[in-house]
Every structure is written in C-alpha cells, then in structure tokens.
C-alpha cells in the first residue's frame, strides 16, 4: 500500500511541477491566452469540437492582441506579416507531427498536403501541378464543370418545384453534391462513374463520411496522445472497418476508395482509355523517365488529397455566396452580375463584378476557418516578426484566415462590412487587396486547386442567376471544423421572366 501511495504522490507532484513550469517558466508563458490552454491541448480540442473555434479564437485576439497562446506549445498569430512568415518561403518552418494523419504510418509517405519539409513539398508540387493543374490544364476541365452546373440547376429547379412558390428550400446538400460530383469527375474522369457519383448505388452517406473524416482526423491531431491512440492497430481496425450494405456489398467511403484504387492502381487503362481529360489521366500519361512521374500509390494519394480538400471547401464558399446574394444587401448585386455576364456569357469567370462578389464573400466567410499549424525548427526561432523573444524549436504557430479576413488592421474600419465594391478599383489598388487576401493561402504552399474552385464558383453562380432571383429568407446554419460544414441554407428561387426580372417582382 505504501508503495502505491508513494507512486501516486510522485505522479501528482510531477503533474503539479509540469503545470507550474508551463504557467510561469515556459518560454511561451509571456503570451496571454486561456488559463487551461496554457497547460493542456484539451482546451483547443474542446473549442474545435464546439464548431465555433474560429469565433472563440477571434474574441481572444480582440481581447489580447495579435499573439495568443492556444496550447502549451502553440501560438496563434493575427497579423498579415505573421501569416506571411509562417506560410511563406521560410524553409525552417515545417509541417510537423500534427500532419501525421495524412501520412502513411509504415513508410511516412503522404501527399503535397502533408509534406513535412519545404524540399519535399517542392518535389511533390512539381509532380502534382505540372502535369495536371497548370492554367492551361485547368481550362481543359471546363466542359466537366459546365456539364455538372447543368445538373445542379436541374436539381435546384426540381427542389423549388416540389414546394409552394413562396416556400424556402434548403440548397446546402444540393450544393455539396454538385461540388463533389464535379471535382471527382475532374480528378478521376468518366471511368469512375458514368453519372454524377453521389447519385449512384452505394454512395449513400458518402458526403457525411468525408465530413466526419476531416472533422475527426483534425481533432485527434490537436492532442498528441489522442493522435497516437487513434493510430494504434486496434483503433485503426475499429475506426476504419469497411462499410457494407445488407447484401454484403461495399458502400460509402469504402466503395469509393476501392473504385478509385481500381482505376488508378489495378486497371489504369480504364482511366487512360476514358474520353475527356482528367487529373488522373494526365498523371498517368507522364513518362516514367520524367522527373514529374509518380508511382501508383503516390498518384492515388495526391488524387485522394484533392478529393478530401476540394468538394467541402468549395461547397462552403458557394453556399455563402448564394446566400449572401439573396440578402437585402446582396440582391442589387444579382442584377449587376447579370448585366455584366450578358456581355460575355461564355466566360462568367472573367466578370469583374462576379469576381468581386466571390472574393468579398470568401474574405468574410473563409471556407477553411481553421488555422493550419506549422512547427518552428532550428533556424526559425526569430522568423515571426514583432515577437518579444525567440520561439523555442517545436513551437506550433498558426494564423487563421477567418480572423485575418475580419481584421480592421488589415481591411480597415469597415472590415466587418460586406462590400464587393472594394474590389472594383484600379489594378494597382486591387493588387494591394490581393496581397491581403489569404483565403487560398500564399507562397509555395498555396492551394493547388484554386483555379478549379474559382471556375466552379463563377459558373455555378452565373448559372443560378441566369435562371432565378434569389431570396435568402431561410436560415444559414453550419459548424466550423477543418472546413466550414453547412447543413442549412434556406433560399427561395423565383424564375426570371424574359426581361431578367423575377416573375411577379416589380422592383
């Protein structure tokens, strides 16, 4: 009994000593933040799982300033200079162990998203972007976008027709199906499915599975011991069990993974023989002696990474854009977009008015309202400007794009106001705004799917406004996890008459 008591006393003493060190003597103790966050990452996990972590963090920055402590070894930075230092070209600020969920446990292999070092990322980016994601390559995917926009409009028409003309419809799930089906076909081509993927047998609950995967993968990385626990063999077996229907057929995420691996690894000829260009097809066509050639597993990981990151974030952006256009403040902009789009209907993405609406909405409603942490390594201790002391190696630093998008220090006193006009300025001033627009990140680690996303957003918004006027009379509800996940977006769609005005509308 005495041995047990001594052991318990030693453990309690060690915990108390650790807490005292973290609170008063740790190099990060000089920075303000929640009391609990100074001693445990559980505060950060709790804030994240609330679905409002971006708002919680924003309030903390408003209270304490540009630098706050969000964990025992974590800092959140709310300045543009800090963002550029963290996500720019500093080779000594890396993606640390936090991103192990995106790496293969046995070999450490991952994708461009989880590449640890700048050198590894540079090689992966060359392979991922060069063959399939340059501006010229992206332009070749436009017919796929156009096809799925037509399907999207048909689904919206059917949803509105199924209720009374004055009733509100929830377009959030329809939008998510559109973004997923479009991006999946751009990535894998027609060989994956001859129709929109979410409409095929076995795709039930697939989108919810992707939402859950991103939510919980990110959550477990916030607490190192929890991440370790979830990566153990028993937990992997428990959480990654194949999903089957009553007849024993694979469904949902399991079926999707199996299909994609079949057309890329087992039978790549299915992808190569399919008609239109796709990202996977472009990867497969790279000669083996080319420096951009990828091994089969490497190729699959890059494609799955795009599937993981693209549909949810693009759905979040499109949801907020259509909802914002339907508000009292946004409705006049519907007519402005139609007027400009009528001048060049074939290229809605060239509309300066539409682009202004898209960027202003994304500025205030970041699709990824989550800060992406980076690890300070030796040589980067003084990389973050305006700090009072060097940071110890191993410190996690991050900057949240939602917070920066709402910052008066960056966007002025009207930072909280939705003003697309701020983007309709001469090129020199617009360039200054672009330098502050960090939704797609910046530098070499910037989003590789940016052009695809903007093309989809432009064509979808132009398509909707070419058919209806939008009234945001319902609710916009969602939770912020890795990406913003909207469950409700209530709007009423009124068919346009020949003059471009909603039928029955007089003003």
Image: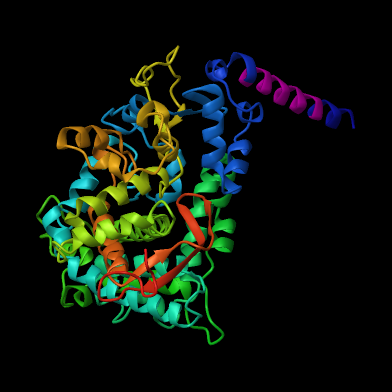
Query: Residue 193 location in percent, x, y?
Result: 31, 79
Front in this rendered view, residue 446 or 112: 446
Query: Residue 190 location in percent, x, y?
Result: 24, 76
User: From what the image shows, is residue 254 above or below residue 138?
Assistant: below
For this orientation, the residue located farthest to the front is 506
Reply yes or no: does residue 19 show up in magenta: yes
Front in this rendered view, residue 213 or 407: 407
Q: Is residue 429 left or right of residue 395?
A: left
Query: Residue 172 location in percent, x, y?
Result: 46, 65
Q: Quadrant of residue 36?
A: top right
User: From what the image shows, is residue 177 above or below residue 485?
Assistant: below
At 48% from the left and 76% from the top, the residue drawn is 204
Q: Is residue 12 left or right of residue 79?
A: right
At 20% from the left and 35% from the top, the residue drawn is 431
User: From what the image shows, is residue 332 above or below residue 42?
Assistant: below
Quadrant of image for the C terminus: bottom left
Q: Is residue 367 left or right of residue 18?
A: left
At 13% from the left and 50% from the top, the residue drawn is 291
Could one spot residue 448 in this view of the protein? no
Coloration of the structure image: rainbow
Quadrant of image for the N terminus: top right
Reply yes or no: does residue 18 show up in magenta: yes
Q: How many marks?
A: 0
Q: Which residues are magenta?
A: 8-22
Query: Residue 434 location in percent, x, y?
Result: 25, 37
Q: Is residue 10 left or right of residue 113?
A: right
Chief SS of the magenta region: helix
């Amino acid at each position: 009994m005495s041995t047990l008591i001594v052991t318990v006393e030693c453990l309690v003493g060690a915990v108390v000593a650790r807490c005292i060190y973290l609170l008063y003597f740790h190099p990060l103790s000089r920075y303000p933040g929640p009391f609990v966050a100074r001693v445990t990452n559980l505060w950060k996990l709790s804030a994240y799982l609330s679905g409002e972590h971006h708002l919680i963090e924003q309030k903390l920055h408003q209270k304490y300033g540009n630098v706050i402590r969000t964990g025992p070894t974590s800092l959140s930075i709310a300045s543009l200079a800090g963002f550029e230092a963290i996500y720019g070209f500093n080779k000594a600020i890396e993606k640390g162990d936090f991103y192990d969920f995106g790496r293969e446990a046995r070999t450490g292999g991952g994708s461009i998203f989880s590449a640890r070092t700048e050198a590894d990322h540079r090689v992966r980016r060359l392979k991922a972007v060069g063959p399939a994601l340059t501006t010229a390559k992206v332009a070749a995917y436009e017919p796929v976008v156009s096809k799925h926009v037509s399907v999207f409009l048909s689904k919206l028409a059917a949803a509105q027709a199924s209720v009374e003309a004055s009733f509100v419809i929830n377009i959030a799930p329809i939008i998510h199906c559109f973004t997923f089906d479009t991006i999946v076909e751009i990535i894998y081509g027609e060989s994956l499915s001859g129709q929109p993927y979410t409409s095929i047998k076995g795709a039930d609950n697939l989108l919810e599975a992707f939402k859950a995967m991103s939510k919980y993968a990110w959550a477990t990385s916030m607490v190192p011991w929890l991440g370790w626990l979830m990566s153990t063999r028993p937990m992997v077996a428990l959480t990654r069990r194949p999903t089957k229907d009553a007849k024993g057929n694979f469904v949902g995420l399991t079926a999707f993974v199996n299909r994609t691996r079949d057309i890329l690894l087992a039978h790549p000829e299915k992808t190569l023989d399919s008609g239109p260009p796709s990202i996977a097809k472009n990867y497969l066509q790279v000669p083996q002696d080319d420096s951009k050639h990828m091994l089969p597993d490497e190729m699959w990981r890059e494609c799955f990474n795009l599937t993981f990151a693209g549909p949810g974030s693009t759905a979040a952006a499109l949801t907020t854009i259509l909802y914002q256009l339907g508000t009292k403040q946004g409705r006049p902009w519907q007519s402005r977009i139609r007027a400009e789009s009528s001048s060049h209907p074939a290229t809605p993405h060239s509309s300066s008015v539409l682009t202004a609406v898209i960027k202003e909405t994304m500025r205030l409603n970041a699709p990824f309202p989550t800060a992406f942490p980076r690890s300070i390594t030796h040589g980067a201790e003084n990389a973050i400007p305006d700090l009072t002391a060097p940071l110890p190696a191993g410190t996690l630093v991050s900057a949240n794009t939602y917070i920066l998008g709402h910052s008066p220090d960056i966007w002025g006193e009207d930072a909280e106001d939705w003003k697309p006009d701020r983007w309709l300025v001469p090129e020199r001033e617009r360039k200054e705004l672009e330098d502050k627009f960090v939704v797609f990140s910046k530098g070499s680690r910037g989003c590789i799917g940016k052009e695809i996303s903007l093309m989809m957003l432009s064509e979808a918004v132009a398509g909707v406004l070419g058919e209806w006027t939008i009234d945001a009379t319902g609710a916009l509800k969602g939770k912020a996890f890795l990406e913003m996940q909207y469950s409700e977006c209530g709007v009423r769609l009124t068919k346009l008459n020949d003059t471009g005005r909603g039928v029955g509308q007089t003003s």
